[in-house]
């Protein structure tokens, strides 16, 4: 049962129950919708970009504890970071949750986001954790239409 | 004599498996059931000893394979109380069965401005094929509403059907809530207006004694894998007078009696609807699965499963944080619920680590979930090999879930 507690750590449960930046940014200039058709998780990410700087970031949506907490922690980690930082975090986050590279030295600058390290033991839940991040990338790039995990 | 679940459990080898170090408690039977050894051995035996193509060989193997395949058809006829084996068509599963009817009967007899009636309880497989048909021919889909308990509103049905209604597609048992639909009554109402009724029996066949003639269903279809048989095989029952006037579904070998480049004469029933080499081993396996159920006695199976369901419902009512979704008095096999404010996927993940397999999600019934104002539910669904101990394990694990996620 150890890996269950690794997955559902205090921080994850806290962010899933009290998501931060859980609102729409009214004067956002980028946004995207993400959807996981397998389980119905959905998330919309709102961004206020000033050139490459993420001045503000928020989300709305519904889904499981993992997807909600992942979106919430993502927004807290990226405020006042650059889009370059965001892409870098995205790569490392995806490598971490898919178990491709979860060395602590590699993940150091992910900070609190490392709480999702345990997801790699739950292959069917990887998409829950990564959905907000894929949606973020789409929002930055302003791809039209809905982003789907499938 | 009552059923001995411990003895039955031994017939299903997979139930000896451990999942994450815990004994497997399999409660996802509405998705697919496990297979008894007899079915696994029948398929094995077929490929080891009888494998051959059917309906054409002059050689012994082909004759034996044909006998086994057609023997399975007769077993299915008897099991659902159809009049003739020519009314039993093998398909890949319930989904293909509904598509078959939509694309043959539907394309020919439903036209622009006509209406097709389904219900809020339907699985996507009994929605989408009709939507596709509606788009093709310009027909309209109408939906029978439900009450908050998850029961069909029969009075509304009477208002919905009219002279334009050309077909009704209805489930026998809801896969998401377990509601048993009062089929006989509904079919009677439809027939008073000369509306043929297509019944999705995928969730009913494993739990209820079904007699298609007593029900007076015009079409009744189900999947083999939900009734202890293999995947990739299913059945469409259709009344002969309908099947005869329907065009073929797919063209190919076996569905013809003669072919020239100018014209093709189609084969007689049921072969007209079975183009190409079918899933011979699957049909044989399904026949053996039904034999197995028969030896247990379906009435005893239904009684036993009801007992299990009542036991689980009683346990649910003792758990304050558990909310049952769907309160139909008549139900079979299924309990849908939500635990506290937790998302079904999180509950499913924690239960899995306790060796317990349940379904979490929208159960391929998104319109129903929307009607109930839910995104997802947890669903436990029973089979004949489940025991009260399985139910106890489930509720113990649900308590643990509250501790982990609380």
Image (cartoon, grey):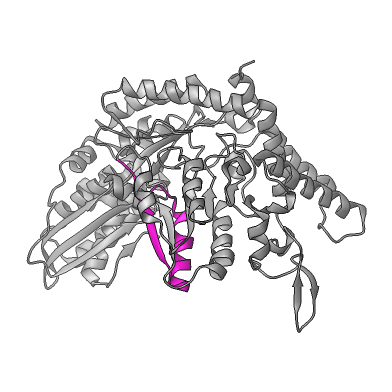
- In this view, the residue farthest toward the right is B59
**Residue B195 horizontal side relative to residue B35, left or right:** left
Which residue does the image show at 45% across and 40% down from the upper left? B181
- In this view, the residue farthest toward the top is B1
Magenta range is B120-147
Q: Nearer the viewer, residue B357 or B68?
A: B68
Question: How many numbered marks does the figure carry?
Answer: 0
The spot of residue B84 in percent (x, y) is: 73, 48
Magenta span contains residue B130: yes
Magenta span contains residue B382: no
Quarter of the rendering containing residue B313: top left
The spot of residue B293 in percent (x, y) is: 66, 32
**Residue B276 horizontal side relative to residue B328, left or right:** right
Q: Quadrant of the C terminus of chain A?
A: bottom left
- Observer able to see residue B204: yes
Above or below, A91 against A15 in this view is below
Q: Quadrant of the N terminus of chain A?
A: top left
The spot of residue B355 in percent (x, y) is: 46, 30
Quarter of the rendering containing residue A13: top left
């Amino acid at each position: 049962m150890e890996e269950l507690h690794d997955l559902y750590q205090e921080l994850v449960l806290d962010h899933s129950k009290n998501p931060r930046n859980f609102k729409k940014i009214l004067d956002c200039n980028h946004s995207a919708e993400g959807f996981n058709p397998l389980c119905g998780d959905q998330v919309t990410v709102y961004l206020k970009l000033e050139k490459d700087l993420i001045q503000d970031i928020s989300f709305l949506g519904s889904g499981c504890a993992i997807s909600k907490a992942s979106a919430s922690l993502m927004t807290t980690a990226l405020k006042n970071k650059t889009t370059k930082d965001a892409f870098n975090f995205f790569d490392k986050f995806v490598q971490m949750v898919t178990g491709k590279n979860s060395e602590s030295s590699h993940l150091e600058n992910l900070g609190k986001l490392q709480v999702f390290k345990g997801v790699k033991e739950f292959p069917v839940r990887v998409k829950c954790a990564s959905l907000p991040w894929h949606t973020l990338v789409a929002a930055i790039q302003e791809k039209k239409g809905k982003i789907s995990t499938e | 004599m009552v059923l001995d679940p411990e003895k039955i459990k031994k017939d299903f080898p997979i139930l000896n498996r451990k999942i994450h170090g815990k004994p497997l408690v399999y409660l996802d039977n509405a998705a697919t059931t496990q297979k008894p050894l007899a079915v696994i051995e029948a398929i094995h035996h077929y490929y080891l000893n009888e494998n051959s193509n059917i309906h054409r060989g002059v050689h012994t193997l082909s004759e034996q394979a044909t006998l086994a395949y057609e023997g399975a058809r007769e077993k299915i006829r008897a099991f659902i109380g159809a009049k003739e084996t020519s009314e039993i068509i093998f398909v890949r599963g319930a989904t293909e069965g509904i598509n078959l009817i939509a694309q043959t009967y539907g394309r020919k007899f439903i036209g622009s401005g006509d209406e097709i009636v389904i219900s809020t309880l339907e699985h996507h497989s009994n929605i989408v094929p009709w939507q596709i048909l509606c788009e093709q021919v310009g027909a309209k889909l109408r939906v029978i509403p439900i009450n908050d308990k998850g029961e069909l509103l029969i009075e509304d049905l009477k208002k919905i059907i009219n002279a334009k209604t050309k077909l009704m597609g209805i489930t026998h048992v809801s896969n998401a809530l377990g509601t048993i639909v009062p089929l006989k009554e509904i079919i009677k109402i439809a027939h008073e207006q000369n509306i043929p009724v297509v019944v999705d029996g995928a969730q009913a066949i494993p739990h209820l004694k079904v007699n298609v003639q007593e029900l007076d269903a015009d079409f009744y279809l189900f999947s083999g894998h939900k009734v202890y048989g293999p995947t990739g095989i299913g059945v469409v029952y259709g009344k002969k007078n309908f099947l005869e006037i329907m065009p073929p579904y797919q063209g190919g070998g076996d569905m013809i009696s003669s072919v020239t480049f100018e014209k093709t004469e189609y084969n007689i029933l049921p072969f007209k609807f079975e183009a190409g080499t079918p899933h011979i081993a699957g049909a044989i396996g399904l026949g053996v699965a039904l034999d197995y159920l028969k030896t247990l006695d379906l009435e005893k199976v239904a009684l036993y499963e009801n007992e299990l369901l009542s036991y689980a419902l009683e346990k649910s009512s003792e758990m304050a944080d558990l909310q049952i979704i769907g309160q139909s008095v008549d139900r079979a096999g299924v309990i849908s619920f939500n635990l506290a404010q937790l998302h079904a996927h999180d509950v499913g993940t924690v239960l899995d680590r306790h060796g317990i397999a349940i379904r979490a999600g929208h159960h391929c019934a998104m319109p129903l979930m929307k009607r109930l104002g839910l995104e997802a539910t947890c669903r436990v669904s029973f089979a004949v090999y489940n025991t009260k101990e399985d139910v106890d394990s489930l509720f113990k694990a649900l308590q643990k879930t509250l501790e982990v996620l609380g």
